[in-house]
Amino acid sequence: MISVLSACNDANGKEKEQGEVGIVQEATTPEPVADTKTDLDSDNTIEKEEVVNDTGNATTNTTSTKSATNTEQKTHLSSGDDAINYLRKELDMEDAEDVLFDAGGAYLKTDEHGSYYTIVLSSKTWKGGGGSGTLERYRVYEDGKYELDYGNHSSKSIQITNGDEAIAYLKNQIPEGTNEDVIFGADPELQTDEKGSYYFVRLSSLSLRSAGGTGTIDNYKVYEDGTFELYRAI
């Protein structure tokens, strides 16, 4: 500290002690360096940074760097309604008001791929015209897999030898077989494709015919061994 003593006369001639004028030079004290601690949580990968400030209080800054974990949720469909809701979503037909989904009694069946529900899609408009309205059939498996159901593999002992037998067999396999409005007709000629020999069976609606149309609602290939599938013209 440097002290300066000075005297001066005031306006009345009196001497007045001005006092000490202090010029103080303080040494600059360096700010405390923060004591940083980093903890690593191995489970959630969370970094915690603890900083000790100049008041002696510790503050903790936490930064989460948790990485996303891909968790596969296994699908299990336990009812026909589950299968219908699942298929609607998968086909993006949740808002398709004209399409009906039917689980056919929700009976669980089994094939070489597992247990499945048969879901039949039909058109309200077509049904309103008197037909079955069938659009497609699907096999929806319990694990969420699904596929178009083109037919049914029967016992090896089945042997269909003519068109009438093909009609009688098909009626027992599909829902339209009990619909009085639906009539079945078969081409008597045996035809062949890469899968084997089959009879061509056509399903028609009486009410649609009476309205002036052909009334055709579906066509099937019924093979000699009892296998059948919907026929789709290319």
Image (cartoon, rainbow, N blue to C red):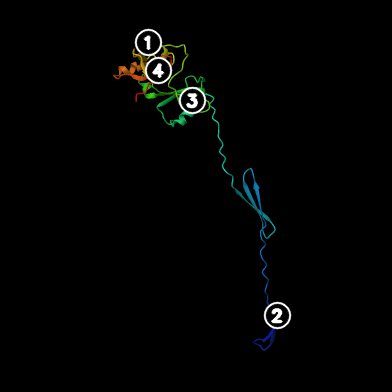
What residue is shown with label 3?
A: 140
Label 3, label 4: how many angstroms apart (C-alpha)?
A: 27 Å
Percent from the top left, x then y, of residue 109? 51, 19
Q: Tell me the quarter of the picture where residue 10 sits.
A: bottom right
User: Residue lying furthest bottom in this view?
Assistant: 13
Q: Nearer the viewer, residue 20 or 69?
A: 69
The amino acid type found where label 3 is placed reads Val
What residue is shown with label 4?
A: 196
Q: Nearer the viewer, residue 22 or 14?
A: 22
The amino acid type found where label 1 is placed reads Asp
Q: Secondary structure at mark 3?
A: strand
Above or below, 169 relative to 18: above
Label 4, label 2: how many angstroms apart (C-alpha)?
A: 120 Å
Q: Tell me the quarter of the picture where residue 98 sits.
A: top left
Q: Residue at x 38, y 16 (%)?
A: 197
Q: Nearer the viewer, mark 2 or mark 3?
A: 3
